[in-house]
Image (cartoon, rainbow, N blue to C red):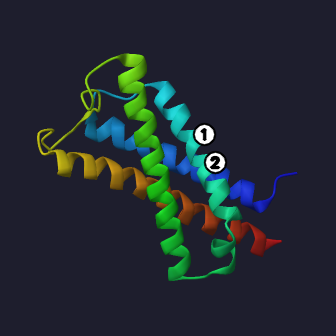
Amino acid sequence: MFTSESKKALVVAIIADGVDFIFHYFFTYPMETLTYFVVKFLLAFFVATFLYGFVFYVQSKGWKNFGISFVFALIFSTLMSVYYRAWELGEAQVPFGSRAPQIYGIARDNLVLFSGTWWLGHALFFVIGVFVANKIISAAKNRK
């Protein structure tokens, strides 16, 4: 029914979205919208699907695999940022960068630190999802 790659992609999306929800709930204000989390879930699923079908990822192991995962995580985070900025300018019609929630403890006026935290943080959530998905699906395969 489902391939192990699609199962892994689903787990990546669930974990990345779940960790992001927890991050927003405890460390940002205001909380993000349901639409934001739905878009993030779908984007994580599709990027993870491409990752698990990427020939260099499938053929590599260890640190090389981690490096490829991190590159895909940066792609995921970049695509999410592009969506978010497009939504700000197009749909919400607010000034660029004004809608992003405040991260407790990081000044919004430090643009490099603030934007970098968002970009790398969301990439990290994706990598965590990949790591967990690989462990869960591999463990389930080994039990059979």
- In the picture of the structure, the residue carrying the numbered disc 1 is 42
Residue 53 occupies quadrant: bottom right
**Left or right of 140, for residue 95:** left
Classify 139 as above or below 129: below
Q: Quadrant of the C terminus?
A: bottom right
Pick out the residue farthest to the right.
1
Disc 2: CA contacts within 10 A as few (<14), some (14-19) or many (>=20): some
**Residue 46 numbered mark, or none:** 2
Classify 23 as above or below 2: above
136 or 94: nearer the viewer: 94
Classify 111 as above or below 100: below
Q: Residue at x 48, y 55 (%)?
A: 75
- The total of numbered circles placed on residues is 2
Q: Are marks 1 and 2 in contact (CB under 8 Å)?
A: yes
**x, y (%) of residue 115?**
26, 46
Three-letter code for the amino acid on which mark 1 is drawn:
Leu
Secondary structure under tag 2 reads helix
**x, y (%) of residue 30?**
29, 27
Q: Residue at x 49, y 34 (%)?
A: 37
Q: Residue at x 41, y 58 (%)?
A: 124
Q: Residue at x 53, y 66 (%)?
A: 69
**x, y (%) of residue 143?**
78, 72
Q: CA distance from mark 1 to mark 2?
A: 6 Å
Disc 1: CA contacts within 10 A as few (<14), some (14-19) or many (>=20): some
**Residue 120 numbered mark, or none:** none
Three-letter code for the amino acid on which mark 2 is drawn:
Phe
106 or 75: nearer the viewer: 75
**x, y (%) of residue 73?**
48, 58
